[in-house]
Amino acid sequence: MDKKFLSVKDIDCYKSAFDLSNKIWALVAKWSYFEKDTIGKQFVRSIDWLDKAKARKIINDAQYLEIKREIENLPKQINQLIKYTNLALKD
């Protein structure tokens, strides 16, 4: 029996994380040199700096809410992937 393997590009949580990283990149690209150098590089690598970026008014409320919503959705998608993988491995 041939097993079907998923391509990483077919995984919803990968696609969501990839899209989110592109949004962050586009957002940070518009910042001043100082903002990019102090928080931007870290923000691109780790979006845990979301609250700091909002507090420092580097991003606006709408950008904050959009990014936060996507971050909150990722664990659900990862959970679904784990469940799917576990079921597929049982076959």
Image: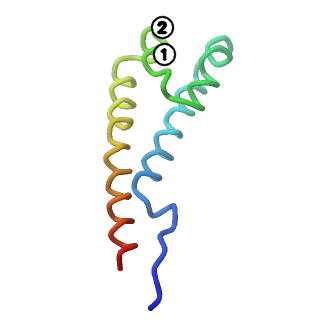
Which residue bears the numbered disc 2?
56
Q: Is residue 68 left or right of residue 32?
A: left
Residue 91 against residue 6 in the figure, above or below? below
Residue 49 against residue 77 in the figure, above or below? above
**Quadrant of the image containing the C terminus:** bottom left
Q: Amino acid at mark 2?
A: Arg
SS label for mark 1: helix
| Mark drawn on residue 17 | none
SS label for mark 2: loop
Where, by quadrant of the figure, is residue 44 drawn?
top right
Residue at the (39%, 31%) spot, across then down: 67
- The image's colouring method is rainbow
Residue 72 against residue 64 in the figure, above or below? below
Q: In the displayed image of the protein, which residue is found farthest to the front?
A: 90
**Quadrant of the image containing the N terminus:** bottom left
Q: Position of residue 55 (x, y in %)?
A: 43, 9
Q: Is residue 21 left or right of residue 80?
A: right
Where, by quadrant of the figure, is residue 10 drawn?
bottom left
Q: Position of residue 17 (x, y in %)?
A: 47, 45
Residue at the (51%, 47%) spot, across then down: 18
Local crowd at mark 2 within 10 Å, few (<14), some, or many (≥20)? few
Q: Position of residue 32 (x, y in %)?
A: 63, 14
| Mark drawn on residue 53 | 1
In terms of depth relative to the viewer, which is nearer, 71 or 65?
Answer: 71
Residue 76 against residue 37 in the figure, above or below? below
Q: Amino acid at mark 1?
A: Ala
